[in-house]
Image (tube, rainbow, N blue to C red):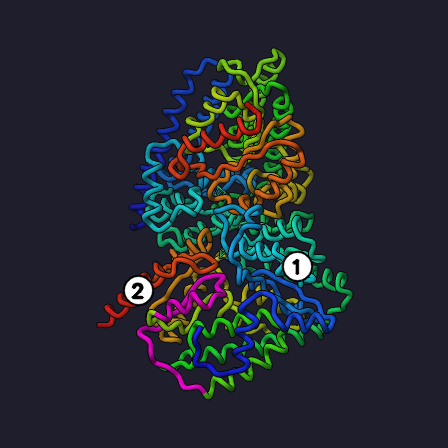
Amino acid sequence: METRIDSEAFDRFREVTSSIGNSEIEAWKQAGGKVVGYFCSTVPEELFTAAGLYPFRMRGTGSTSTELSDGCFSNINCSYPRHTMNQALLGEYDFLDGLVCINSCDHVRRIYDNWTVRLDTPFVKVMSLPRKIGPPQIDWYYEEINLLRSDIQEHFGVEITDEDLWKAIKLHNEVRALQKKVYEYRKLDAPPISGAEALPVMVAGTAMPKERYKILLQQFLGDLEKLEGSSDYRVRLMIVGGELDDPEFMQVIEEQGGLVVTDSTCFGTRLMWRPIDESVADPVRALASYYIYDRPSCPRMYGDQSRRIDYTKELAKEFRVDGIIGERLIFCDQWLVEHYMTNADLKEDGIPFLQLDREYILSGKGQLRTRVQAFIETIEGMRS
Amino acid sequence: MDVQAVKTQSLARYKEERDWFALLAEAAKQMPTSEGELQVKLLEILLDSKQTVVDCVENDKPFIGGYFCNAPELFHAMDLPWFMLMETPFLAASAPYLLNDIEGAEEMGMGTDLCTAIRLPIYYIENGLMPVPTALLGLLYPCDGAPMLHQVIEHNKVWKDVPIYACDPPYTSDERAVQYFAEELSRMVEFLEKHTGKTLDVDRLKQVCEESNRTYSLWQDYNELRRSVPSPHGWAIGGAQAFAISQCFVAGDPRCSAWFEQLCKCAEERVAAGKGASDQEGWKEKIRLFWFDIMPYGWIFEYMPWLESEWGATIVMDMFGNFPYTLIDTSSRETMLHDLAKRNLLDAPMIRQARGTAENFSNDIRRIVTDYKIDCVIWPGHMGHKDGSATIGIMRDTCRELGVPFLHIGLDLFDKRYTSIDEVKDKTSDFFRGMGLA
Ligand code: SF4
Ligand code: SF4
């Protein structure tokens, strides 16, 4: 991918996100460190940082087939877990010392079952994430986090004190604040960074230790400040959806003249738009409230659609977007129905919306281009 | 569409559905056997429940929308009529309007990868074809589709004023999970009391749960009889019907136990006479089959009799006829809620297999194959069952371990156009032949 950004930090971000294994992991393991993988942005990664573990968000980057995982899944399953499992069966995840799965959706939750049958990672757990967002659910997740905390302590022979947790929460919040600064640049008329460039910056935050990432992110912000923006685009777009870690998808959209200036995705703003509340007494309570209620939710959380659409509209306004693209991985029931409601709500406000179904590993670029072009033309037509 | 228009239109549709069942009941009356009598009784109970809902809508009496896994004994004890929001695809899958409805859902953007049992109710809600209840109990498990349906309901302009409560299902299955779910059920009762004006009397609940236990004991006895070779009954009676009557229509009602008593009697007579399900139809049981899902309601009459007549394949057990139920300790409100939670979280079909981790898929296969002397397992691969489809490797391995052949078809249980009936039959025939079962 061509880029105007001249930054060593940015190069590191791109390097660590272009494949699964990366040099950061190698260095960490050589120093005797342990790495724990996790699925979904609702797993409290602060816990791993507090335990001195390297948190790694699971992806299927670089996968070219699902030949091996086809024995586990079928052709009506989402391509994200299929490619990710395939990578694992190929040995790409052999560096993991542990894995934490979660019941985020019908496809991803089965990774836990298949992983425990087919692979021998020493520590594999599954968290029970509630479907609702009320106080009893916060209490339930509070217990879940504490149970995971005990399991980690026992398995890895570490102690996770409340102080460790607060330190991790502060660090992750600092990272969130820095990531928000990157997004501030995207509000400009002439942003110095495109959507395809911003994505690896965000994904890198889930692929390297937070302390190291924070330093690089500070450097990156310094580099970004010096960069001149570009107003060479036709419309400003927002992406709403789930598991999107592929900059190429963004690039195809941007090549048609639609600059992606913001998003509500699970590698995007939903990771960092709001911080964890540091004013409460118990750090685990702070984590439970954050992951169940405070952070922007995804359609998997029932009863929160009205807050979700408000969040989408708020961001659309703040970033002055001309249209919204709802991306969805084929076979995802959650995003299919969510986009149906989003479309209806945006129509009432006159905000153009396009739903794009895709595979995890980008295919059908020609069709994608055509649909995006037509969408951009529609938006332009509405202006004139 | 305003509330009044929805009321009129949905009532007309609901009556149409009721009349469809009345027609089926008339046809069932022509069957001269005891099993035929059971079908008629079941259809009459179903018609009665439909008529009660019609009466509630017409006369502004309280009634609720709910599900079989929301502990229906509780609504029964509260004297609350209810209907299941997803019932059309299950019950009236053969109804003449169903294929048009599926097309309507597709036109709305609910494509062919969303479970038909979800996209149809979405279509009904959005098009004013579903009776609007006084209060609604949502469903957040076992699949991703169910919570999405209920979010559409909350989003819908007519339905958004209907009070809704949905129990949150934990993903785990230990005592902590059961306790948590029991508290959710308790909050559900508070919600119902607040919005329907009905109350839950503990003595009445005790009575209902005791009756429900009686039903379930009879069901257990019946399922013991199905172990016989040949099996006294196949797909046509005793599986899905046993589930429907006990959990969907008259949970904890003496009519339900009476139905099971008669069912046991029919089966006992057949077993004593060494007769199988086949004897009344003139075919012989050659293959004992475990159909591991819901029945293919959209084309059941085109496939199930064919399995029997063409291959001598008896569905000895299916997912909904499977009996793992916990009996309820009726000593107090707490014990009843606890055991109802356990039953509705860990035992109820589909919820049992699909809600949590995959071990229940393999455990059920293991238990049923052994107990019922099963020759082969068919996982139909319904297009909505994504978690199950992500478990096929585990199911296949389990069957391999047990030495029984396993078939995964890939179809839509409610829409026969997804995989044509001929293709399903061809796959089945190839499987029976290839595995030496023919
Ligand atoms: S995109 Fe949908 S199906 Fe795929 S992992 Fe996410 S929630 Fe699950
Ligand atoms: S996917 Fe299965 S559990 Fe979910 S609605 Fe469809 S039939 Fe029911």
Question: At 61% across and 66% down in the image, what residue appears?
Answer: A21
Res. A144 mark:
1
The amino acid sitting under disc 1 is Glu
Residue A4 vertical position relative to residue A138 in the rendered view, above or below: below
Dot 1: what SS?
helix
Decide which of A310, A352 is in the foreground and name it.
A352
Decide which of A205, B244 is in the foreground and name it.
A205
Dot 1 and dot 2 residues touching (CB under 8 Å): no
In the rendered image, residues at marks 1 and 2 fall on the same chain: yes
Q: Nearer the viewer, mark 1 or mark 2?
A: 2
Question: At 58% across and 32% down in the image, what residue appears?
Answer: B377
Q: Chain of mark 2?
A: A
Q: Residue A346 in the image: x percent, y percent?
A: 34, 63
Question: At 31% across and 74% down in the image, what residue appears?
Answer: A234
Residue A58 visible somewhere in the drawing: yes
Res. A44 mark:
none
Residue A314 vertical position relative to residue A190 in the rendered view, above or below: above
Say which label, 1 or 2, has the lower sequence index. 1
Q: Is residue A253 magenta?
A: yes
In whole angstroms, how far apart are the C-alphas of marks 1 and 2? Answer: 44 Å
Dividing the picture into quadrants, the one containing residue B21 is: top left
Dot 2: what SS?
helix
Residue B187 visible somewhere in the drawing: no
The amino acid sitting under disc 2 is Phe
Residue sticking out furthest to the bottom: A226
Decide which of A100, A86 is in the foreground and name it.
A86
B172 left or right, relative to B281: right
Q: Which residues are magenta?
A: A227-255
